[in-house]
Image (cartoon, helix red, strand yellow):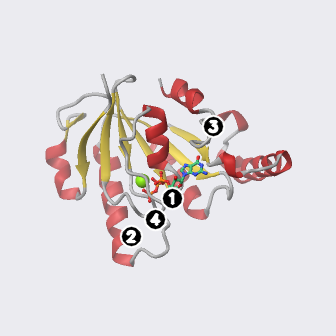
Amino acid sequence: MASEYLITLADPGQIPTLLKRGFLNGRSEPRIAFVGRSNVGKSSLINALLEQKIARVSAMPGKTKAIHFFLWQNLKKIVADLPGYGFAKVAHSEKNAWVRLLDSYFSADKALECVLLLFDSRHGPTEQDLEALEFFAHKGIPIQIVLTKTDQLKTQSDRAKRKREILESLAPYTVEAEDLVWVSVKDNKSIAVLRERLK
Ligand SMILES: Nc1nc2c(ncn2[C@@H]2O[C@H](COP(=O)(O)OP(=O)(O)OP(=O)(O)O)[C@@H](O)[C@H]2O)c(=O)[nH]1
Ligand SMILES: [Mg+2]
């Protein structure tokens, strides 16, 4: 059976009816949330993992404005595609709305299994990425860090250099090399590896 779109959470006001006693809209499958800055590749990665064009991908950052939930049929899990953070052109009021929505969601969902934290492999974690890492670590939510768009690192020395820098910046958070998965949706790199880890 195919994976499917379930529901969208656009306003914290929906939470009391949507999330009840660990159920999301009446479903008990554990949740995996995809978190990262705008344009990092969250929706693309969901489509690659689920092998279905189910989440909306766009070259224009800030496409995903609400939390979209999908049923990942093969793994019997629910995937949450979250709006990206750190898009400079977003108005201040919209940023606050983002924080409110995500904070209420993460406090309310009692069946959140894991957060996939996506960093762009070309730049490494930004200040906001590290804030997000701290936020989930503080909440005691298991985190899987994913480096995206590795096809953009063209040479071997480029890749080695990035790897070193990224590991250095993550060392204070006791993150080690084996905690990271380096993916490319374009090359289908490590998509299967990540799928296995999420099982
Ligand atoms: N080269 C390359 N491009 C990618 C990869 N993954 C995603 N992209 C591109 O990056 C852009 C943004 O991808 P999305 O999946 O929409 O990113 P997002 O994180 O969901 O963005 P928001 O919904 O705005 O938060 C699109 O143009 C994708 O085609 C990848 O592995 N390699
Ligand atoms: Mg998206």
**Mark 4 sits on what residue?**
60
SS at mark 1? loop
Cα–Cα span, label 1 and label 4: 7 Å
Q: Give above or below for 89 relative to 80.
A: below
**Label 3: element kind:** strand
- Residue beneath label 3, please? 181
Task: State which tag comes first along the sequence, 1 or 2.
Answer: 1
Which residue shows up at 39% across the image and 77% down it?
A: 92
SS of the residue under disc 2: helix
| The residue at label 4 has a CB less than 8 Å from ligand 1 | yes
Residue at 68% across / 46% down in the picture? 151
Answer yes or no: disc 1 within 8 Å of ligand 1.
Answer: yes
Dot label at residue 39: 1
How far is disc 3 from disc 2 in space, using C-alphas? 29 Å
Residue 10 percent across, percent down from the top left: 25, 57
Tag 1 near tag 3, CB within 8 Å: no
The crowding category of the residue bearing disc 3, from other C-alpha atoms within 10 Å (few below 14, some 14 to 19, many at least 20), is some
In the image shown, does 112 or 148 lie closer to the viewer?
148
8 and 145: which is toward the camera: 8
Q: Amino acid at mark 1?
A: Asn
